[in-house]
Image (cartoon, rainbow, N blue to C red):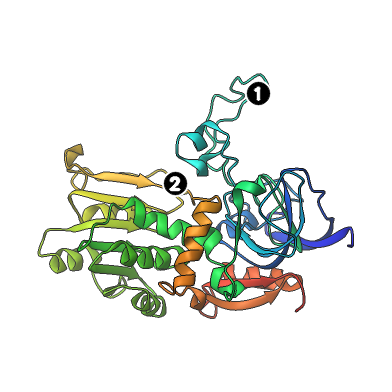
Amino acid sequence: MTQMMKAAVFIEKDRIEVVDKKIPDVGPNDALIRITTTTICGTDVHILKGEYPVAKGLTVGHEPVGIIEKLGSNVKGYHEGQRVIAGAICPSFTSYPCQDGFPSQDGSYLLNEDGTCSCHGYKATAGWRFGNIIDGTQAEYVLVPDAQANLAPIPDGLTDEEVLMCPDIMSTGFVGAENANIKIGDIVAVFAQGPIGLCATAGAKLRGASVIIAIDGNDERLAIAKSLGATVTLNFRNCDVVDEIMKLTAGRGVDSAIEALGSQRTFEQALAILKPGGTLSSLGVYSNDLTIPLKYFAAGLGDHTIRTALCPGGKERMRRLLNVVNSGAVDLKPLVTHTYALEDIVEAYDLFANQRDGVLKVAIKPHKE
């Protein structure tokens, strides 16, 4: 096997380039994956624009679909040549957050070798390693740490495109529905129908919501939301969303609202249409302080629940998501709207970052088929 590979790395603000990089060595707890398909995430665009800091020269990307090239000596139950995915979040399941039931927060508390805290702080993205603190997946190969805990075999018959959403977008969207406390027969509103919002819509349907209101400013995305389970679609460019939803619910408000954009406006609207005792499930990544309007928050007396989440990872999470795809309950392949070779990834970033040509998700193929 060649000792060098192609990888898309962060060079500086507004520059991600494909360079030659050494194929990583495999430690006893690792697995080397030959990437067959990966994709570009909105977080990667934040990295490109210099809005989220990573080290220069880091390989970006965090959504791997591939084939096991080499296994570490401690990794059991898998074999070389096996098709697998790993979550965008690859927890060790040894840290305090992992054992406290929040594996996506693995490593959030940074400790010295003697076990004392090194920073007296909290790093909310520490559980996210690929393309953040270790080399990521937009490359010919990626090293998966703690492979025993994170590799999930792909069921026979499923294509890369059918499972490409599992490592991040599907896992994140579904946890939005899971955190929303949806009960059978509930009314749920999902703000923003990008890839994560679309998966949240699909997740709300699976959780038993009978009325799902999808909100976006793009009619094509609203049509996809309909195909994934939305019963009502609202284009915010054509109506007052809050007024319309309150009319639809006869003034009661929705049981749950899922916010999948990360803006003050959508967060505020999600709270405004929430019933007393309802749940606001937040998936957006916010870049500024949020203000909670007093009247919508009922002065803190409305029995509201606000939940946030970081994409759940680990092999059991991935197994469950693969089961959903394999059962035919959800088809997320239509979210993959474009395909590019790794060597053309700069062009793919330009398309995705500027949201041209109806793009939702881009499949990146590091190897010529």
The front one of 47 and 340 is 340
Relative image position of residue 181 (x, y in whole percent) = 28, 52
Mark 2 or mark 1, whichever is nearer to me: 1
Relative image position of residue 182 (x, y in whole percent) = 27, 56
Asked if residue 262 lies left or right of residue 166, the reply is: left
Q: Is residue 148 above or below residue 257?
A: above
* Mark closest to the chain's N terminus, 2 or 1: 1
Q: Can residue 136 be seen in this view?
A: yes
Asked if residue 256 lies left or right of residue 24, the reply is: left
Q: Mark 2 points at which residue?
A: 288
Relative image position of residue 52 (x, y in whole percent) = 59, 49
- Amino acid under disc 1: Asn
Could you say which quadrant of the image residue 256 lies in? bottom left
Dot 2: few (<14), some (14–19), or many (≥20) neighbours within 10 Å? few
The image quadrant where one finds the N terminus is bottom right
Could you say which quadrant of the image residue 190 lies in? bottom left
Marker disc for residue 287: none
Secondary element type, mark 1 = loop
Q: Residue at x 81, y 51 (%)?
A: 24
Marker disc for residue 112: 1
Q: In this view, does 359 lie above or below 19?
A: below
